């Protein structure tokens, strides 16, 4: 007896449970699935690792880099400004224009890179509008999927369905042969997102939103006046006047604490040895005051300033506390940064929507806290490799190379235009674009590497391995044929409904490419056996394979917005499952209306 299908079914159910419960991170679940299938002998090591070398993965990695090049050069600013001009200051019009731009672009370009390109635009717009990114990113992903259903080149599954149909002696599907029903699906989807879907969307702040928002830019820091400071006896007003952008919050003098304003109290007007000032300001101002002679960090934050020596390169970097960080709930004092990270010193903390008024060393860290850290440049790579936080670029690196924007835009146009005209394979064009981005100075090679989200890469590879296991074990074919056999006697509409539901269900769990390749010949065989024209059955697969709304792993664009939106697995179920039901009901009307059931005489 062949136990492989049962084994794969158990693995698939276990993965879904882990995804839903979030007991492990999604990329770790994918890794465990891949290793389990290899150890179980369902797939070989080469088959499990094929995803890393697949053309699709190469394209996805390249699109991350190309998107980073557009962002770093400010090449997307014109698009963003154009959307704002089109909206005329109206928030609803702006969101509508944004989603329409995504959908229209996805109809003629591969919707995966479209989503990658628009993601930073959406993040920027959400900050400017004061809207949580979670309210916009799922609609953006869904808009790219809906737009891709309108033309033959909108998504790879459309091309695959057309190819398989042609191999089964059907006429070649034209570029706009299904644009009318595709537009109906898109309009219905947009109406759902604008009404019921809008109420179902979560309001959740993501880590990336927390650090990119321009609303709160003031960190809290503290400085000390040592016994040999030349600033002793000077008024705090005089000391701070030379550093614009700094505001005093509190003076700690021994066991006494004095709240601002300090100048009004004769006891706190002038500095004394050992005084500690709690201050707030932007990173540039904090850096400037720490460079002043006679001012240093308190010992519990670090003695880097005294120990670093004038000949060593010291820089400021920003670290964002990760969701699974062991530092959450611990104080900065207890975290012992200096010992853990080569003398790095936390000089300031930023927390969204909260005014910190306690000593920096005693602040208990939370998810999304941004730490301003002073360190030797030699340990930056060590900080980048830490699992506790995400390293943002050093403050000196946050430069928008606007002079390179035309070059970056031209490179992206070359990639997209070449793919549209089918001049070269998209993978070749994408790799060429990455090389040009680096060679022309639009993107440093280090930033290019860092722009590739390896957690998404691992998630995709693991899910591709699961899809391959379902095919090779025969599980997918067994489930498909069993369902079709049960429904065949209930008439063509019920069979088409069953094919659509099966396709949409499988594509929420495994690669929609695999689903399209698997179910298209089955749908055509069923049509032949029932003596009906194949179009309704064929397009049930085509539209069902794009109904990837109910899970984050259902489609690449859902994966892209998963982290930046701060989403949970259940967010996609809550919004996407009702949308799937609405589009299923739409399919029951649109498919037989546009392609009537016609008997074919043998």
Image (cartoon, rainbow, N blue to C red):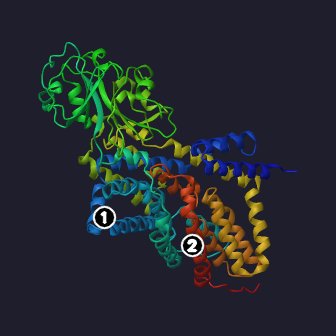
Q: Is residue 386 left or right of residue 593?
A: left
- Disc 2: CA contacts within 10 A as few (<14), some (14-19) or many (>=20): many
Q: Secondary structure under badge 2?
A: helix
Q: Is residue 381 left or right of residue 277?
A: right
* Quarter of the figure that contains the C terminus: bottom right
| Disc number for residue 512 | none
Question: For mark 2, what is the residue?
Answer: 583
Confirm whether residue 421 shows in the render: no
Q: Is residue 212 left or right of residue 6?
A: left
Q: Is residue 42 above or below residue 200?
A: above
- Disc 1: CA contacts within 10 A as few (<14), some (14-19) or many (>=20): many
Q: Residue at x 57, y 43 (%)?
A: 25
Q: Residue at x 75, y 61 (%)?
A: 477
Q: Position of residue 535 (x, y in %)?
A: 63, 78
Which quadrant would residue 276 be assigned to in this image?
Answer: top left
Question: For mark 1, what is the residue?
Answer: 83
Q: Are marks 2 and 1 in contact (CB under 8 Å)?
A: no
Q: Position of residue 153 (x, y in %)?
A: 50, 66
Q: Is residue 297 above or below residue 403?
A: above
Q: Nearer the viewer, residue 392 or 359?
A: 359
Q: Is residue 589 above or below residue 6?
A: below
Q: Position of residue 450 (x, y in %)?
A: 42, 39
Q: Nearer the viewer, residue 132 or 529?
A: 132
Q: Nearer the viewer, residue 103 or 193?
A: 193
Which mark is first along the chain, 1 or 2?
A: 1
Name the residue furthest right.
1
């Amino acid at each position: 007896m062949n136990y492989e299908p049962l084994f794969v079914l158990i693995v698939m159910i276990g993965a879904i449970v882990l995804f839903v419960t979030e007991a492990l991170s999604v990329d770790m679940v994918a890794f465990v699935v891949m290793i389990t299938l290899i150890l179980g002998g369902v797939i070989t090591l080469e088959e499990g690792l094929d995803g890393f070398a697949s053309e699709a993965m190469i394209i996805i990695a390249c699109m991350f880099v190309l998107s980073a090049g557009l962002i770093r050069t400010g090449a997307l600013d014109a698009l963003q400004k154009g959307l704002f001009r089109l909206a005329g200051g109206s928030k609803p019009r702006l969101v509508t224009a944004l989603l329409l731009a995504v959908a229209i672009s996805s109809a003629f370009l591969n919707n995966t890179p479209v989503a990658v390109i628009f993601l930073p635009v959406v993040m920027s717009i959400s900050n400017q509008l004061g809207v949580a990114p979670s309210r916009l990113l799922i609609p953006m992903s869904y808009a790219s999927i809906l737009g891709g259903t309108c033309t033959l080149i909108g998504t790879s599954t459309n091309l695959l369905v057309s190819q398989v149909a042609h191999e089964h002696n059907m006429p070649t599907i034209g570029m706009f042969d299904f644009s009318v029903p595709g537009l109906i699906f898109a309009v219905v989807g947009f109406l759902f997102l604008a009404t019921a879907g809008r109420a179902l969307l979560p309001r959740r702040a993501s880590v990336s939103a927390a650090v990119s928002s321009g609303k709160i830019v003031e960190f809290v820091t503290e400085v000390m006046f040592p016994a040999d400071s030349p600033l002793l006896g000077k008024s705090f007003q005089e000391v701070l006047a030379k550093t614009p952008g700094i505001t005093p919050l509190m003076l700690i003098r021994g066991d006494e604490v004095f709240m601002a304003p300090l100048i009004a109290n004769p006891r706190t007007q002038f500095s004394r040895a050992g005084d500690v000032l709690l201050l707030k300001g932007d990173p540039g101002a904090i850096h400037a005051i720490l460079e002043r002679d006679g001012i240093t960090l308190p010992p519990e934050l670090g003695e880097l300033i005294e120990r670093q020596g004038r000949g060593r390169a010291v820089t400021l970097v920003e670290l964002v506390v990760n969701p699974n960080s062991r530092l959450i709930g611990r104080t900065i004092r207890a975290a012992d940064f200096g010992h853990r990270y080569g003398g790095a010193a936390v000089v300031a903390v930023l927390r969204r929507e909260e005014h910190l008024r306690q000593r920096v060393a005693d602040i208990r860290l939370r998810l999304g806290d941004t730490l301003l850290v002073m360190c030797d440049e030699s340990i930056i790579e060590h900080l980048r490799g830490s699992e506790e936080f995400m390293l943002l670029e050093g403050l000196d690196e946050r430069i928008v190379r606007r002079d390179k924007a035309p070059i970056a835009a031209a490179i992206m146009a070359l990639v997209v235009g070449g793919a549209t005209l089918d001049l070269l394979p998209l993978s070749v064009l994408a790799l060429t674009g990455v090389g040009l981005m680096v060679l022309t100075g639009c993107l440093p090679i280090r930033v290019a590497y860092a722009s590739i989200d390896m957690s998404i890469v691992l998630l995709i590879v693991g899910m591709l391995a699961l899809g391959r296991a379902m095919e090779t074990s025969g599980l997918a074919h067994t489930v498909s044929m069993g369902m079709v056999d049960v429904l065949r006697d209930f008439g063509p509409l019920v069979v088409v409904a069953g094919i659509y539901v099966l396709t949409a269900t499988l594509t929420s769990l495994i690669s929609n490419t695999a689903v399209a390749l698997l179910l298209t010949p089955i749908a055509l065989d069923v049509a032949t056996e029932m003596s009906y024209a194949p179009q309704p059955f064929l397009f049930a697969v085509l539209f069902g394979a794009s109904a990837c709304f109910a899970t984050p792993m259902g489609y690449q664009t859902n994966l892209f917005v998963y982290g930046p939106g701060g989403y949970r697995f259940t967010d996609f179920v809550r919004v996407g499952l009702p949308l799937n039901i609405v589009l299923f009901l739409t399919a029951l009307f649109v498919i037989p209306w546009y392609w009537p059931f016609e008997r074919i005489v043998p």
